[in-house]
Image (cartoon, rainbow, N blue to C red):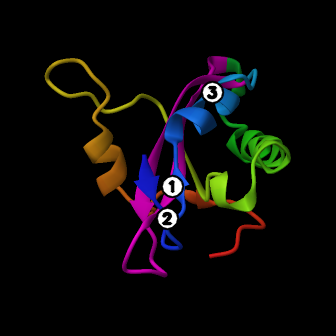
Amino acid sequence: MFVRPDGHNNHPHIMNELIAKHPAVKAVNTVGVQSPYHTMGKYPKAVIILKEEYKGKEDEVQQELEEWCMKAFSQRDIPYYYEFLEEFPYTPNGKVDYKVLENEGVGKANVAKGVIF
């Protein structure tokens, strides 16, 4: 869980469950990243690995995911950023390294359309 700048709690597993149901998504992890617009709190970033047949179609998939999330969640609970990777970073123990995903911030991520910061 992480806290947005407005004090709202976000639960990544809820976003992950919905996004993982999309036919193009092989794997997803949602993390909180520091927004360039606020000094406190974090915004959700969905980090996604696409299935092989959807690689190169990131813009289309992102648009579909944004629509899915907007229908299922309130504005405060949707991913604000989307990042597509070939694979997740892993710790020496073989677990997803969430710290790396968080520390990468919004640099390589695409901003979701229609979000209000």
Label whose residue precedes the other's in the sequence (2 or 3): 2
Tell me where the magenta segment starts and ends, as one range. Answer: 24-52
Q: Quadrant of the C terminus?
A: bottom right
**Would you say the residues marked 1 and 2 are in contact, meaning their CB atoms lie under 8 Å apart?**
yes
State which mark lies toward you, 1 or 3: 1
Give the CA distance from mark 1 to mark 3: 17 Å
Work out which residue is located at the far left of the displayed protein and give it: 92
Q: Is residue 102 above or below residue 5?
A: above
Depth order, front residue of 85/34: 34
**Would you say the residues marked 1 and 3 are in contact, meaning their CB atoms lie under 8 Å apart?**
no
Q: Is residue 94 above or below residue 85?
A: above
Q: Residues within 10 Å of mark 1 (few under 14, many from 20)?
A: some
Residue 110 coordinates in the image, percent (x, y):
60, 58
Residue sitting at x 75%, y 55%: 74
Residue 19 coordinates in the image, percent (x, y):
67, 32
> What is the quadrant of residue 38 in the picture?
bottom left
Residue located beneath label 3 in the image: 17
Residue located beneath label 1 in the image: 9
Q: Is residue 2 above or below residue 26?
A: below
Label whose residue precedes the other's in the sequence (1 or 2): 2
Q: Residues within 10 Å of mark 3 (few under 14, many from 20)?
A: few
Residue located beneath label 2 in the image: 4
In magenta segment, residue 91: no
Residue 114 coordinates in the image, percent (x, y):
78, 67
Give the CA distance from mark 2 to mark 3: 20 Å
Q: Amino acid at mark 3?
A: Glu
State which mark lies toward you, 1 or 2: 1
Q: Which secondary structure, mark 1?
A: strand
